[in-house]
Image (cartoon, helix red, strand yellow):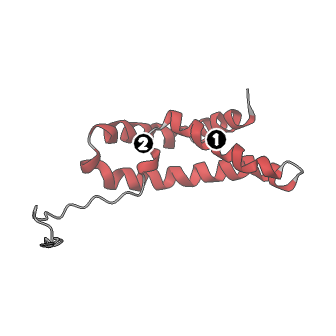
């Protein structure tokens, strides 16, 4: 098993309760994003902190050594593996605009007569 997968499993096991709660909200959010955006953002903020912490742990050793150029690739692989478990994780922090705007926009173009 690759190192980034080991770190992902360790992260999920060490923070089992947090990720179980987030999984429930994540699944509900994928069905109804507008209604659950605020709750998803609040819970997702905590989850992102844990993910960043484990990503930093994973990449810390490679950044100091002679393999530092592979650190970004390792971080990308870790993030992609997280996305396989939580596909909507990139939607954390989105703001839903609930204001009702009219269908007419303020922008218009005037026609130019070329004759």
Q: Are marks 2 and 1 in contact (CB under 8 Å)?
A: no
Question: Callout 2: helix, strand or loop?
Answer: loop
- Specify the label residue 78 is tagged with: 1
Quadrant position of the N terminus in the picture:
top right
> Which residue is the site of mark 2?
88
Q: Residue at x 33, y 60 (%)?
A: 95
Q: Residue at x 70, y 45 (%)?
A: 73
**Dot 1, crowdedness within 10 Å: few (<14), some or many (≥20)?**
many
Q: Nearer the viewer, residue 2 or 76?
A: 76
**Does 7 sit left or right of 45 as displayed?**
right
Disc on the earlier residue, 2 or 1:
1
Extreme top residue here? 1
Q: Residue at x 75, y 49 (%)?
A: 71
- Up-down: is 43 above or below 6? below
Extreme front residue here? 115
- Up-down: is 57 above or below 30? below
Quadrant position of the C terminus in the picture:
bottom left
**Does 114 sit left or right of 78 as displayed?**
left
Q: Position of residue 12 (x, y in %)?
A: 59, 37
Q: Position of residue 66 (x, y in %)?
A: 89, 50
Q: Nearer the viewer, residue 88 or 49?
A: 88
Question: Callout 1: helix, strand or loop?
Answer: helix
Q: Position of residue 100 (x, y in %)?
A: 13, 63
**Does 48 sit left or right of 42 as displayed?**
right
């Amino acid at each position: 098993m690759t190192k980034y997968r080991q770190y992902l499993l360790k992260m999920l096991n060490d923070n089992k309760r947090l990720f179980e709660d987030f999984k429930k909200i994540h699944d509900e959010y994928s069905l109804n994003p507008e209604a659950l955006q605020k709750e998803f953002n609040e819970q997702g903020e905590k989850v992102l902190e844990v993910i960043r912490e484990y990503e930093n742990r994973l990449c810390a050793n490679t950044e100091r050594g002679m393999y530092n150029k592979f650190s970004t690739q390792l971080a990308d692989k870790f993030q992609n593996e997280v996305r396989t478990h939580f596909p909507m994780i990139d939607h954390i922090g989105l703001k839903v605009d609930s204001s009702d705007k009219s269908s007419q926009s303020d922008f218009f173009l005037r026609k130019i007569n070329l004759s």
